[in-house]
Image: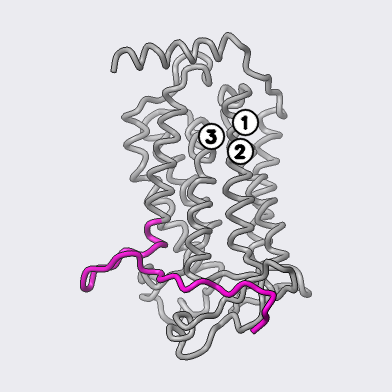
Amino acid sequence: MHSAAIVFPDIDPVLISWGPIAIRWYALAYIAGLVIGWRYIVSMVETPGLWKGPAPLDREMVDDSLLWAALGVILGGRIGYVLFYNPAFYWEHPLDALKVWHGGMSFHGGTMGVIVAMWLFSRSRKIQPLTMLDLVTAAAPIGLFFGRIANFINGELWGRVTDVSWGVIFCNQRIALTHGGFCPAGDLPRHPSQLYEAALEGILLFIVLRIFTHRTTALRKPGTVAAMFLVGYGAARTFVEFFRQPDEQLGFLYGHWLTMGMLLSAPMVLLGLGLFAYLGGFGLEWRKNGDKKSEATAKAKSSDKK
């Protein structure tokens, strides 16, 4: 062991268990991301100053979209992992693709799954699809944050070997027992890349999108927030991939730098830039004081009614 490094804490991946029933931190992260994200979307819909006129959908529509979003995350995440990260194994063991409780989810797949689900939902409810995508992508960093924290708690998807003072040794008695007496990450300090991603894809991206949704007229130009999310997520993920250890079954795709995460992030950035071009560029304005005053008045009236 290295005395200068941080030894990974002994965290049980199971939060609570009753006999055969177990609630894992990973499942809780998905639930928290969906529920908090749903509440955040509701708050945007109920903030009149963000829109040009009435909001394009109501609380009931947002509530109905939650199930679609959950299905998009789970199906997209699982299909993405099967197709991009371990296709050879699942070609030989196709039924194992259904065993989601064994782990194996792709964040790129989950993100694209939600986008497809929301597009279909908006078409079925006659909502402008780009507006629905704006709302969902504005809230997406919340789920990304909780997901990456869960990755860290599980001691998975760790980074490359490093000599920085905050390097983490992803090895303890629990991890060793789980893997037949050894730690897959070894006993060398590694970048806690899960926390890097939580900070960039979660916190930073949320703040940037929050500034644009609440301080500019971005939501009045459907597709703008979705485009910013695609570019922002793809760029943040690509940056962190330089510190993250590639999946063992894939390794580096080219040289000692190109990873599957980078390869999957490139189309997202290009799609975002293409959407910007389709919309005719940025073209946003800072929200006027009158918008904020009307928003405050609406909130005050809502409070009086309660």
The colour scheme of the drawn protein is one colour
Q: Earlier in the sequence, mark 2 or mark 3?
A: 3
Residue at the spot 47% in from the left edge and 28% down from the top edge? 44
Residue 172 location, x and y as percent?
51, 80
Q: Nearer the viewer, residue 248 or 148?
A: 148
Task: Kindly indicate whether the residue at mark 2 contacts the one at mark 1 (C-beta within 8 angstroms).
Answer: yes
Would you identify the image quadrant in which residue 36 lies? top left
| Residue, disc 3 | 134
Would you identify the image quadrant in which residue 208 lies? top right
Magenta region, residue range:
1-28
Magenta region includes residue 233 = no
Q: Label 2's element? A: helix
| Residue that extends furthest to the bottom in the rendered view of this protein | 181
Residue 284 location, x and y as percent?
68, 23
Q: Which mark is residue 80?
A: none
| Residue, disc 1 | 211
In this picture, residue 284 sits left or right of residue 92: right
| Residue, disc 2 | 207
Picture mark count: 3
Disc 2 marks a residue whose amino acid type is Ile
Q: CA distance from mark 2 to mark 3?
A: 15 Å
| Picture layout, residue 182 above or below residue 117 | below
Residue 142 location, x and y as percent?
50, 46
